[in-house]
Image (cartoon, grey):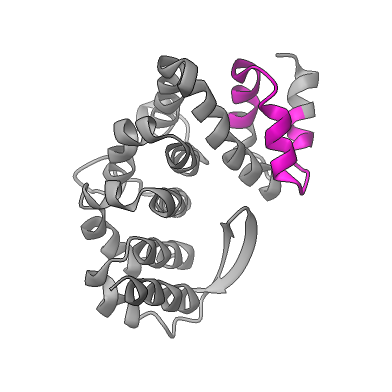
Amino acid sequence: MGIREKRRISKLLESSDIEAVIHELRQLPASRVINPLIGALCSSNETVRWHAITALGPIVADLADHDMEAARVVMRRFMWSLNDESGGIGWGAPEAMGEIMAAHDRLAEEYGHMLVAYMREDGFYLELPQLQQGLMWGLSRFAMVKPDLLKAKNVIIYLLPYLNSPDSTVRGLAAWALGLLHAGEAVASLEKLVNDPAQVKIYLNRTFVADTVGGLAHKALANIVKES
């Protein structure tokens, strides 16, 4: 793909109408679209970055439907980017993995355990707070669609310590994820956060939302009570 087309896709991602963008991108071969979308994960423009994450879900899911091995290559590419040996940092990789697995059942079954492994100090623990933010978001996105798959991997046990993170976005997203998982065992810890005034800005339902850690904890508790 030429530089001109990469720039065109980056420009498309600036649009406020992400549904129209996704529709247009799905008309192109995945092989021409995926690399520019992955490149956009490092964009300093947060709209471009999050729209790239959003678009990767259906694009890679479409790819998996007709070439599962090619979709696995994409997932392994994200995993490699989070490996210390890669020499990179893996910006946007946990979020993209969560979005893709929310969109495709088979990829979720094959790679869902990796999001849990990235939380575990005896696994592939992500130390950088920015990557932990992405991991909490990816887990939340996954939990919106496939909570039982995550719970089967004991995700709640590994999520609970993140409620004590010094990073407010990590705390808030961990609370949100636990609410989506209807984690009754998290109630006591979430109740301790309901007065946490730290501001959090998250990308939710394809738009940016401002909240507080306490607000997210309160919503999580409401989700858990509603399910019980």
* Residue 60, placed above or below residue 133: above
Decide which of 164, 116 is in the foreground and name it: 116
Q: Residue 104: image x %, image y %?
A: 43, 34
Q: Residue 47: image x %, image y %?
A: 69, 48
Asked whether, in this view, residue 93 is left or right of residue 30, the answer is: left
Asked whether, in this view, residue 168 is left or right of residue 174, the answer is: right
Q: How many marks?
A: 0
Tell me if I can see residue 83 in this picture.
no
Residue at image location 40% in from the left, 77% down from the top: 222
Predominant secondary structure, magenta span: helix
Q: Residue 73: image x %, image y %?
A: 43, 19
Residue at image location 68% in from the left, 35% down from the top: 22
Residue at image location 36% in from the left, 27% down from the top: 85
Decide which of 223, 140 is in the foreground and name it: 223
The answer to whether residue 32 is magenta is yes
* Picture quadrant where residue 32 is located: top right
Please state the extent of the stretch shown in magenta in the rendering.
9-38
Q: Quadrant of the N terminus?
A: top right
Decide which of 126, 71 is in the foreground and name it: 71
* Residue 60, placed above or below residue 196: above
Q: Quadrant of the C terminus?
A: bottom left
Tell me if I can see residue 142 in this picture.
yes
Q: Residue 98: image x %, image y %?
A: 44, 43
Extreme-bottom residue of the structure: 195
Asked whether, in this view, residue 52 is left or right of residue 183, the answer is: right
The answer to whether residue 45 is magenta is no
* Residue 74, placed above or below residue 12: above
